[in-house]
Image: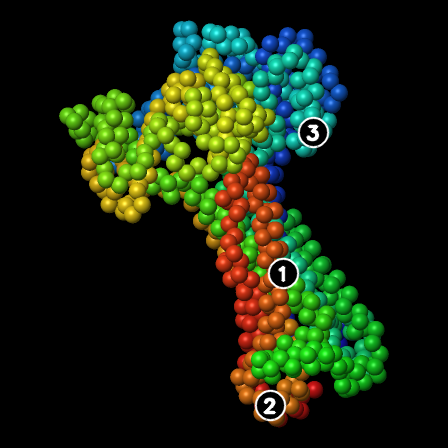
Amino acid sequence: MKAIPVIRALRGGLSGRRVQAIVIGLVVGVSTAASTLALGLVADSSAPFDHAFAAQHGADATTTIIGASPAQLTATTHLNGVTAAAGPFPETSVSVAARITPMTKISAGGHASATPITVHSQLTLVGRSSPGGPVDDLTLSSGHWPAGPGQMVWASGSEGLQPAIGSQVTVTGVAGSPRLTIVGTATSVTGTAQGWVTPSEIAALHAAGAPEASQMLYQFASAGTAGAVNADIAAVAAALPHGSVAGTQSWLAAKAQATSSSAPWVPFIVAFGLIALVMSVLTVINVVSGAVVAGVRRIGVLKSIGFSPAQVVAAYALQVAVPALIGCVAGAAAGNLLAVPMLGQTAEVYGVGSLAVPFWVNLAVPLAMLGLVSVTAVAIALRAGRMSATAAIATGRAPRPRHGYRAHRLLGRARLLPRPVTIGLAGPFARPGRTVITLTAIVSGVTAVVFGFGLSSSLDRVQADLSHAASGQVQVFLGGPQGGVTINGQSPAKLSLAAQEHAVAAALQAQPGTAHYAAEADGVISVLGMSGQQLSVTGFGGDAAWAGYGMISGHWYSGPGQVDVNTAFLTDTGSKVGDQYTLTSGGKQVTVQIVGEVFAPDGGRPAMLGSMSALSAVDPGLSAHQYLAGLTPGTDVGSYVNALQSALGPGYLVSVNDRGGSELPAILSLVALLTLLIVVVAGLGVLNTVVLQTRERVHDLGVFKAVGMTPRQTIAMVVSTVAGIGLAAGLIAIPAGVALHQYVLPVMGNAAQTGLPASVLNVYQAPELILLALSGLVIAVAGALAPAAWAARARTAFALHAE
């Protein structure tokens, strides 16, 4: 029955120290929630890909090779470091027209439309005799593999379309315009092609003048990092004729794209989780050490009635473990709730119906957090267990050691400050260890505030850069959803594209308030050397330098043949700003000059921007579908949109630019929530410190009240005990928060496969930093107000009789 006395002592300790118990529970709960969210996102963002990659023997590198003989290609399979290989498979890039029936397309009237539409696209086709193999073992999800000419298997998710089995696609730009019947669908974990045919079919689909290409798939002994994969690819290239490797794709790029929906947000959640974890440990140390110091006499009483050292340690450790356990359970539940909207974005990756925080995460995080807290509590409680009963009772009754008197004397000479304030400012020097812990806790809180502010500001700028709403406030779509209206005597549906462009350009020129405008055309092409990726191209008609694209390096295109590309393009192709790059697609070739790296994440897909004339050389179907208009300062956007819509008629759609999306606002809300939680935790840590100090000095408080200290002076004295700490913490936390922001933002960008422009990183201004530094004082004062009010209300007689 040795446990019964411990339980009774535990109940008495918890009932007497409810504030400390609540503080521990909340701090541990916040830390557990942030850790559960971060680890759950990490596990669920990569687990589906990892499982599929292992099951399908995914290719560490997919290479497109031109001009090498079959014998030379076979020789590369025996290179050191190559553990498995497949190929060579003939490869070509074709333009196709596919007639499909949209399943969920909504017409302008709001009714489901089952009208077939023709979709023009470019596909990379690879000739394979079977879906299986030692590398890139394709998963045939429906239908069967091509058994003869005129048949193809469509890659699941290619171009976001899924034509029905039995439908046909017409290959354009090839003699005879052959038709291919879709006989099945298959999935390649690393996206090695958008479709597969028999090897003999490739010759019939080969456009005149296009180089003959082969695809080789490799697995390497070491492919865990980009450096290792690049080194192996370099070895393959060295074994082949110079310049024959037209392009490569690493499995790491495919994984990054597959996890791009949630991976960018994990780093900042981990940062908040680590801050909360540090505060958990600090709060536990503060609470337990404070309980031991304040309860020395009670420890002596427990020992005198027969408590063993182990029972004393257990009683004080359990005073922390019980609220920590409640906090762990509640925090794990909160982490799961916070993860729901973010996991929903990756729920359909590789056909996964739904995602949730894995069971092992829900088990491991609370257990690890509880273990960390318990170890910290036991380590400090051992001090109480080693005390003898006589020493503890004597120490509890004897006057406390006199610390901080020199600080009291020095501050007492400060005539400009009221005496209650100087007494309060000198208070922290009496308990230097506790002061350091409190300072660190407030520093953590202010660091979170500085980091959260910077992160929110950066994400605001990211959203502005992605939407271009600040520079191009208005969009005009050609042939709006309410067709059938006559313009210059003709229906928009019957007007040629050139006539529609002329009508929109004339209306924009005539509309007051138009500062700039440019036609925009978007397309997707398949390029030799980028087998598993399709290249997004955006062409502009006219000067679009004002459109608001953030530049990471280089400059906006300005001359013939110049283009800008995003980071994913540079990564996937191994090129850099200043290089020339030859685009080979559908039998057409064009060499462009890369003059800038533009901020356009595009979900981790490679993208290229340039003039419509330059990009239409490789994508003849590229044509304007909208105009982007910038307005002069002071122009009312709503009035402008209404006037332009009236001028064009309802055959065109004029709208306010809203291309920012809805994902970032949800992330901003999460940032604000996590920042607020950590600030609250920091305030609770201050509250705990002030409660301990007030209880320890309650007798002194009675003396001050007896000699005439007013309630307002009492509040000022108590608040001043942490005000100085808050100011110091604010000054320390500013560089810490800025450094954390400068570290985490590039990590987030790297996870999204994009660099970041300087405008996204440089968000702090001097006046803002001054205000942010004062947040330490705000946290300290807010945490001290409740115990200060209690001290002000305490009766003098009660305080004088208190131990």
The residue lying at 67 percent from left, 52 percent from top is 364
- Do we see residue 520 in this rendering? no
Measured as percent of width and height from the top left, residue 611 is found at: 40, 25
The residue lying at 61 percent from left, 93 percent from top is 706
- Do we see residue 763 in this rendering? yes
From the image, tell me which residue sits under label 1.
732
Which mark is first along the chain, 3 or 1? 3
Label of residue 705 in the image: 2
Left or right, 521 with respect to 763, comes to left
Q: Nearer the viewer, mark 2 or mark 3?
A: 2
- Is disc 2 placed on a helix, strand or loop? helix
Q: In this view, does 338 lie above or below 549?
A: below
Which mark is first along the chain, 3 or 2? 3
- Is disc 3 placed on a helix, strand or loop? helix
Task: For marks 2 and 1, give the CA distance.
Answer: 35 Å
Q: Which amino acid does label 3 sit on?
A: Ala
From the image, tell me which residue sits under label 3.
228
Q: Is residue 668 above or below residue 80?
A: below
Left or right, 341 with respect to 275, comes to left
The residue lying at 54 percent from left, 64 percent from top is 775
